[in-house]
Structures are given as structure tokens and as C-alpha cells.
């Protein structure tokens, strides 16, 4: 994904919210690691837009619980690269898998969504700071 993104990429999903440029590329660098399995299907392109369904299967970092996240992605292309990437998935289902009972009970609330986003962005910021100066 890092190589597919336009320099001016705008990414959005329910966990991270809106990320732009290097922040979006670093999200992929941070998330794609040994143990994650990513599959895709129903890839479609029409003019300067596209879509795909993809599934990420992994152990969630803080709990170790297995997550199978089914995602619908939409893309906008510019200069042969993805300039806009929007992922849609059920946050309550994700939270239930990743966090167990707490996610089941609170996964549909804005309180938990905001807490998850804050933690994800802090983790991304720390990853980016550690990575500075590396190619």
C-alpha cells in the first residue's frame, strides 16, 4: 500500500479517522507485520475510482485476541496512484473481537471509539518518531 499511495494520499477508517501523506503510509508500515494475513476480492476499477473487499486476520496487540476484520475499501486514483482511500467496517464487531466483553458492551459507543482512536493515533505517532531518519 505504501508504494501504491500518491504523495498527497488521504486515508480514512473508523479506527484512525483521517490520515494524510506520510501518516497514512506509516500506518501501513506499523500494522503490516508477521502474523497478519490479508486477503482481498471483488476488486473493481472504473476510470479514476475503484473498490475492493479485503479481510485482515490477526491477533490484536494489547489483548492477543483473534480479529477477523472484513473491510470494504473505496479508492480514488490520480497519476496512477491512490490519492484517496476510505475503509468501512463495523466498529462494534471489530471491538467485540479485539476487546472481548468490554468491546461487546461498549463497542457501539462514541466513548470507546474515541478512546480506541486516541490510542491508535498515539501508537502511530510513537512509531513515526522511532522511524524518523529511516528510509
Image (tube, helix red, strand yellow):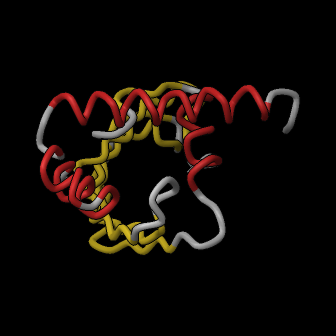
Residue 117 location, quadrant: top left
Query: How far across and how far down the image is residue 103, in percent?
Result: 22, 52
Q: Residue at x 57, y 33 (%)?
A: 124
Which residue is most to the front?
101
Q: Would residue 60 appear left or right of 88 to someone viewing this image?
A: right
Q: Would residue 62 appear left or right of 54 to someone viewing this image?
A: right
> From what the image shows, is residue 13 above or below residue 96?
above
Q: Would residue 96 appear left or right of 41 to someone viewing this image?
A: left
In the picture, which quadrant includes the C terminus? top right
Q: Nearer the viewer, residue 99 or 71?
A: 99
Query: How far across and how far down the image is residue 8, in percent?
Result: 53, 25
Task: Please tell me how many numbered marks the rendered image carries.
Answer: 0
> From what the image shows, is residue 63 above or below residue 88?
below
Q: Nearer the viewer, residue 42 or 117?
A: 117
Q: Residue at x 52, y 42 (%)?
A: 81
Q: Nearer the viewer, residue 66 or 5?
A: 66
Q: Residue at x 34, y 66 (%)?
A: 54
Query: How far across and how far down the image is residue 37, in percent?
Result: 50, 74
Q: Residue at x 47, y 42 (%)?
A: 82
Query: How far across and how far down the image is residue 90, in percent?
Result: 17, 53
Amino acid at each position: 500500500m505504501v508504494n501504491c499511495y500518491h504523495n498527497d494520499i488521504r486515508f480514512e477508517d473508523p479506527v484512525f479517522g483521517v490520515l494524510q501523506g506520510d501518516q497514512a503510509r506509516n500506518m501501513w508500515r506499523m500494522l503490516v507485520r508477521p502474523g497478519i494475513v490479508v486477503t482481498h476480492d471483488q476488486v473493481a476499477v472504473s476510470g479514476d475510482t475503484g473498490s475492493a473487499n479485503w479481510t485482515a486476520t490477526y491477533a490484536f496487540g494489547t489483548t492477543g485476541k483473534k480479529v477477523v476484520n472484513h473491510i470494504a475499501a473505496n479508492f480514488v486514483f490520480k497519476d496512477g496512484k491512490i490519492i484517496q482511500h476510505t475503509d468501512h467496517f463495523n466498529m462494534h464487531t471489530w471491538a467485540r473481537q479485539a476487546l472481548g466483553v468490554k468491546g461487546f458492551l461498549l463497542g457501539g459507543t462514541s466513548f470507546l471509539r474515541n478512546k480506541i482512536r486516541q490510542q491508535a493515533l498515539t501508537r502511530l505517532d510513537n512509531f513515526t518518531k522511532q522511524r524518523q531518519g529511516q528510509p
